[in-house]
Image (cartoon, grey):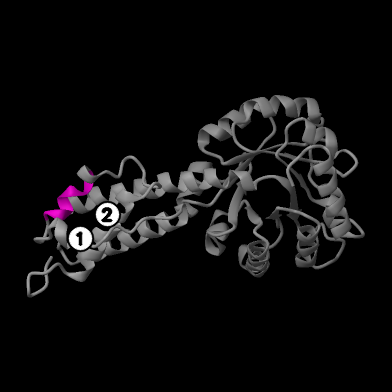
Amino acid sequence: MTSPDNSPAPTHTVLLGLLNGLLASESVPEGLIAGEIGWITGSGGVDAAAIPPSLPAANYPAALAQVATATGLLDILTAAGDLPADSALQMRRCLQDAAQRIGRALRRSQAARIHGLYVIIDPEVTGGRDPLSIAQAAINGGARMLQLRDKLRDKGEQLPLATALRDLCAAHDALLIINDHADLAAAIGPEHVGLHVGQTDLPVAEARKILAPGQPLGRSNREIDLIIESQEMGADHVAFGAMYTTTTKQVTRAPQGPARLREARAAAQVPLVAIGGITAANAAPVVEAGADAICVTAAVGSAPEPEAAAAALTAAIRAAGGRV
């Protein structure tokens, strides 16, 4: 596609520049190589000298943004009939692959954020107080992750709280995890927002189709072999429990305990979250057994002083050698 004076049309040229930038980026997936996009430089009379300077992706989010922009420009060129259908399909698949690979790299880079105190915000476990105030107290007390778990309200009713929790986490460089609802996580993401699913929730592969490529996803596991299964599915972190007797979820099996957590640690190649009945008084054996993060609900949400409870849990994790 060219302009009347035979110079490259702006849309085509910008697309070439974006592709050039992706090729030069350290974040670029191996599949996105010059040979796979060489066809476009021969379309519409554009030569190498017309391609603008490379647009290096300084980080993974920037690389994903370049892929999204390139995909949008590809849509414009395809709709205008300026690209052969087979070439457009090849390029689209290549960009989709780029997004998936860069997304995996971005999620791996975020794995180090999954540590310390992880507090579930459940509107039913607040002692009648505002869930957002519990969340603020948890963050003030040292929580690095929050999860919104609301089993009673519809997603539209959850949205205002979810958005407020996202903003709170963004302000403190913490991570918000949405329980169960991939569409809600996608709606308020992608920055600082991930998803958690259980064994009977949306499968990991299906959830990935809804989430942005860089959004982390965790999965619950009650057995060691399920941890392995979750990793094979592509979960970015795994939860294991219940560690001790818990009152916030109906658990009919005996508690796993720190000994079983050590087995889980040996099987887990991704960050490991321990959950269930953990308090400041019993957190040390869980941390020493290898948990990257400990997840609590009532220990903070039902505490008379949630911030003090969160601070005590954070101190217990630190004293046991955990990263806070």
Residue 262 position in % (x across, y down): 73, 26
Tell me the number on the disc at residue 254.
Answer: none
User: Quarter holding the N terminus?
Assistant: bottom left
When the figure is inspected, residue 292 is found, relative to residue 98, above or below; the finding is: above
Residue 254 position in % (x across, y down): 82, 30
Query: Is the residue under label 1 in contact with that under label 2 (CB below 8 Å)?
Result: yes
When the figure is inspected, residue 160 is found, relative to residue 152, above or below; the finding is: below
Q: Nearer the viewer, residue 211 or 169?
A: 169
Badge 1, how many Cα within 10 Å: few under 14, some, many 20+?
some
- According to the image, label 1 marks what residue? 51
Residue 261 forms part of the magenta stretch: no
Q: Nearer the viewer, residue 317 or 186?
A: 317
Q: Residue placed at 59% from the left, 31% from the top?
A: 269
Location of residue 275 by image quarter: top right
Q: Secondary structure at mark 2?
A: helix
Residue type marked 1: Ile
Tell me the number on the disc at residue 20.
Answer: 2
